[in-house]
Amino acid sequence: MKTSLKTELLKAQKLGYALPAFNFDNLEMMKAIIEAAEEENSPVILMVTESAAKYMGLDYVFALALTACNKAKVPIVLHWDHGFDITLIKKAIDAGFSSVMLDSSLKPFDENVKETLDVVNYARTKGVEVESEIGHVGGKEDDRNSKSNGYSDINQAIEFNNLTKVDALAIAIGTSHGLFKGEIKLQFDLLKEIASKIKTPLVLHGSSQVPLKDLQKAIKLGITKINIGTDLKIACADGLKQYFTENPNDFDARKYGRFAIENVKKQAIIKIRAFGSNNKA
């Protein structure tokens, strides 16, 4: 069933777990996420990025994702992830998404505030919730690359949160989108300070490949939503590689597709259990 981002995040915040937020790029990944959530009795956030939506086709994504959410036996938040194009964000709002994220984190503070307020004001008229980012999580996100990584400034985070009144606030504490190329070192002291001063649910982006123990520590310190994209992409690709290594002459999309679904599902279940959202539906 489709549900509210804010409702699920506040519940997670109260009970001390985090919502797994999974990106999908195709039907197989989407099915794997839903199946994992149902098997683990876990609420999850089903996310699509701009380039993934463009690849699949906006109308196809809207129809498939909304159908999946409405038929699911557990609460599913349908989320537009890392929106850069406000026009597309508003289309997702109009289409019936639970929530949307604007990423203007590389822009000057005042411009980030202005654009976030534009999205918040529009979303409120439709009963849709909004996430935005302060500080910048770099790396490869969607079809964009950013070499800029900037930790969230505590004072800016407080001001941004007060001005925009977003429903979820993404912060930068040392994660990176895509594949990590250096040592992963999260700034737990910064997270602790932000969480002590901001009651809005906090979000961690770029969390693939981060050790589960570090993510679990981040949850204890206040993170309530953890985004996972690359780990599921790798699981999908590895599943296909394994299938065709073992079945080089096969061509049945239903068979290799099912194999990929199972591989992605395994990875999703690992995250669900690590984040403590299992049996929280």
Image: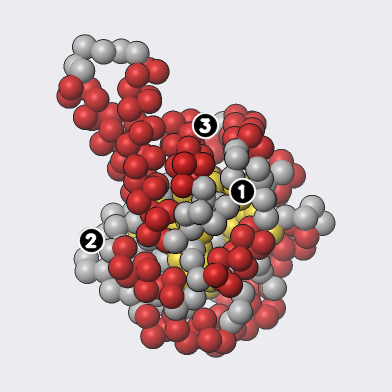
How far across and down, in percent of the image, does residue 208 sit?
A: 34, 56
Q: What numbered label is drawn on residue 56? A: 3
Q: What numbered label is drawn on residue 75? A: 1
Q: Helix or strand or loop: what does disc 2 sit on?
A: loop
Residue type marked 2:
Lys
Q: Nearer the viewer, mark 1 or mark 2?
A: 1
Taking the spot 43% from the left edge, 53% from the top edge, the residue there is 272
Q: Work out which quarter of the rendered image holds the N terminus and state it.
A: top right
How far across and down, in percent of the image, does residue 188 sit?
A: 37, 80
Q: Tell me how far mark 3 sits from mark 1, CA to CA.
A: 24 Å
Q: Quadrant of residue 140?
A: bottom left
**Number of residues whose C-alpha sits closer than 10 Å to that of mark 2, classed few (under 14), some (14–19) or many (20 or more):** few
- On screen, residue 30 versus residue 99, left or right, reads left
Residue type marked 3:
Met
Mark 2 or mark 3, earlier in chain: 3
Q: What numbered label is drawn on residue 181? A: 2
Between residue 277 and residue 129, name the one nearer to us. Answer: 277
Mark 1 or mark 2, earlier in chain: 1
Q: Can residue 220 be seen in this view?
A: yes
Taking the spot 42% from the left edge, 61% from the top edge, the residue there is 275
Between residue 118 and residue 25, name the one nearer to us. Answer: 25
**Number of residues whose C-alpha sits closer than 10 Å to that of mark 3, classed few (under 14), some (14–19) or many (20 or more):** some
Q: Helix or strand or loop: what does disc 3 sit on?
A: helix
Taking the spot 59% from the left edge, 82% from the top edge, the residue there is 198
Q: Tell me how far mark 2 sits from mark 3, CA to CA.
A: 29 Å
Q: Tell me how far mark 1 sits from mark 2, CA to CA.
A: 35 Å
Determine whether 262 is above or below 38 in the image: above
Farthest residue in the right direction?
125
Determine whether 64 is above or below 109 in the image: above
**Number of residues whose C-alpha sits closer than 10 Å to that of mark 1, classed few (under 14), some (14–19) or many (20 or more):** many
Q: Helix or strand or loop: what does disc 1 sit on?
A: loop
Which color scheme is applied?
secondary structure
